[in-house]
Image (cartoon, rainbow, N blue to C red):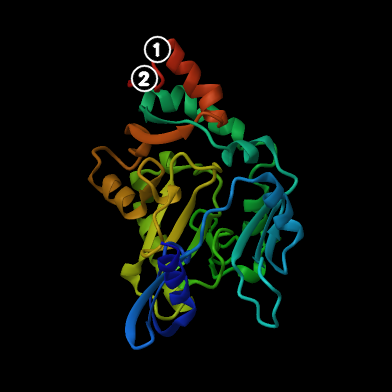
């Protein structure tokens, strides 16, 4: 048994790389083709999960061998870092986001918690969710977005923007999302922020906005393809979140090969083209919109939305979910 283990452990050091077969799982796994002695061999390298050990994790931020800031805006800071030996040309193995000073909302968002499925009817939206959204838009929570829209922060990162103030009902800004490392094209993640303040979420979109949405979708796709040669239009996914973290309409743009994590999951992401199609086929005049439909999404128990609105509604109706109208 010991001899078999020794022989197995001797194989990897003898591996000689011929070519890369694939790079997937958001860059965390790579498949390599090579040979060991005279025989072909495939090696799959995958980063192991972080250990759940406080002594180790407490040392990580203070023992980084290389650190590069990619940007900063309000309380948000993002970096590439290397935890391995320093070199003249380091290969970052960590993408780090720092929220400082962190709020209770940041802590809740990134905490482990139970998740519930909610069916939000037009009545529940109108009577409970809309007032909650209005409260959440205060206290400077949208400052980082307005910094970008007003040209105060991240100006060097902007990929495309409509002329500032020329038409603030149709204007938007396109730039990399803080969760993208700005290097791995298959992990592409951009963010389109609309200039107008009257559209807080998908709920505010109406039939009268169809032309604007289509024009924005075209401009976003064109700017993305021009900025990142080699991409094709059918490799882009455009979607919005409901419920979003921030109540100011913004469009996510990702590569079709990006691993579909929570951000793209059912119960979180709604395709922009699907929204446009639903509005086009919806009965009613130009004022008919997404506030008239039931939307299903997931929400965590640590969120303010759950604690302040949905849980109390559920208790009143003897169930964990928002009632149907």
Binning the other alpha carbons within 10 Å of mark 2 as few (below 14), some (14 to 19) or many (20 upward) gives some
In the rendered image, which quarter contains the C terminus?
Answer: top left
Secondary structure of the residue carrying numbered label 1: loop
Q: Is residue 89 above or below residue 214?
A: below
Q: How much space separates mark 1 and mark 2, taking CA atoms?
A: 7 Å
The image quarter containing residue 52 is top right
Residue 29 appears in which quarter of the rendering? bottom left
Marks 1 and 2: CB-CB under 8 Å? yes
Q: Which residue is mark 2?
A: 323
Could you tell me if residue 219 is visible in this image? no
Q: Is residue 76 above or below residue 89?
A: above
Given residues 58 and 236, the one toward you in this image is: 58
Tell me if mark 1 has few (under 14), some (14-19) or many (20+) residues whose alpha carbon lies within 10 angstroms of its own. few
Q: Which mark is residue 42?
A: none
Q: Secondary structure at mark 2?
A: loop
Image coordinates of residue 286 in percent, x first then y, are: 33, 43
Give the mark, 1 or 2, whose residue is nearer the N terminus: 1
264 lies above or below 21: above
Query: Which quadrant of the rendered structure holds the N terminus?
Result: bottom left
Q: Position of residue 102 (x, y in %)?
A: 71, 43
Where residue 13 appears, as percent x and y from the top left, is 49, 78
Question: For the point 66% across and 81% down, which residue is it?
Answer: 89
Task: Using residue 178 as the reference point, say whether residue 255 is left or right of it.
Answer: left
On the rendered structure, is 88 left or right of 122?
right
Residue beneath the point at 35% across and 78% down: 41
> Which residue appears at 32% of the width and 55% of the height?
273
Q: Where does label 1 land, which residue?
A: 317
Q: Nearer the viewer, residue 324 or 280?
A: 324
Mark count: 2
Vertical position of residue 128 compared to residue 161: above or below: above
Residue at the extreme bottom: 38
């Amino acid at each position: 048994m010991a001899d078999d283990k020794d022989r197995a452990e001797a194989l990897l050091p003898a591996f000689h790389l011929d070519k890369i077969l694939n790079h997937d799982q958001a860059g965390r796994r790579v498949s390599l083709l090579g040979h060991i002695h005279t025989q072909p061999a495939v090696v799959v390298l995958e980063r192991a999960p972080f250990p759940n050990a406080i002594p180790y994790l407490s040392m990580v931020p203070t023992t980084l061998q290389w650190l590069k800031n990619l940007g900063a805006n309000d309380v948000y800071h993002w970096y590439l870092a290397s935890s391995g030996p320093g070199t003249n040309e380091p290969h970052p193995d960590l993408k780090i986001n720092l929220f400082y000073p962190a709020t209770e909302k940041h802590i809740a968002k990134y905490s482990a918690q139970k998740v519930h499925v909610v069916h939000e009817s037009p009545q529940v939206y109108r009577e409970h969710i809309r007032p909650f959204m209005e409260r959440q838009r205060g206290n400077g929570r949208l400052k980082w977005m307005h910094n970008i829209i007003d040209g105060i922060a991240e100006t060097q990162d902007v990929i495309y923007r409509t002329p500032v103030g020329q038409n603030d009902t149709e204007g938007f800004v396109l730039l990399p999302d803080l969760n993208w490392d700005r290097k791995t094209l298959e992990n592409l993640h951009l963010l389109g922020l609309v200039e107008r303040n009257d559209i807080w979420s998908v709920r505010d979109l109406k039939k009268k906005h169809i032309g604007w949405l289509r024009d924005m979708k075209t401009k976003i796709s064109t700017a993305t393809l021009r900025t990142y040669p080699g991409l094709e239009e059918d490799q882009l996914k455009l979607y919005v979140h409901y419920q979003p973290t921030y109540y100011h309409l913004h469009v996510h743009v990702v590569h079709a090969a990006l691993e579909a994590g929570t951000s793209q999951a059912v119960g979180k992401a709604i395709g922009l083209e699907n929204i446009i199609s639903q509005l086009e086929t919806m009965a009613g005049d130009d004022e008919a919109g997404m506030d008239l439909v039931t939307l299903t999404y997931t929400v965590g128990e640590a969120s303010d939305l759950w604690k302040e609105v949905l849980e109390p509604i559920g208790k009143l109706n003897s169930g964990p979910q928002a009632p149907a109208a």
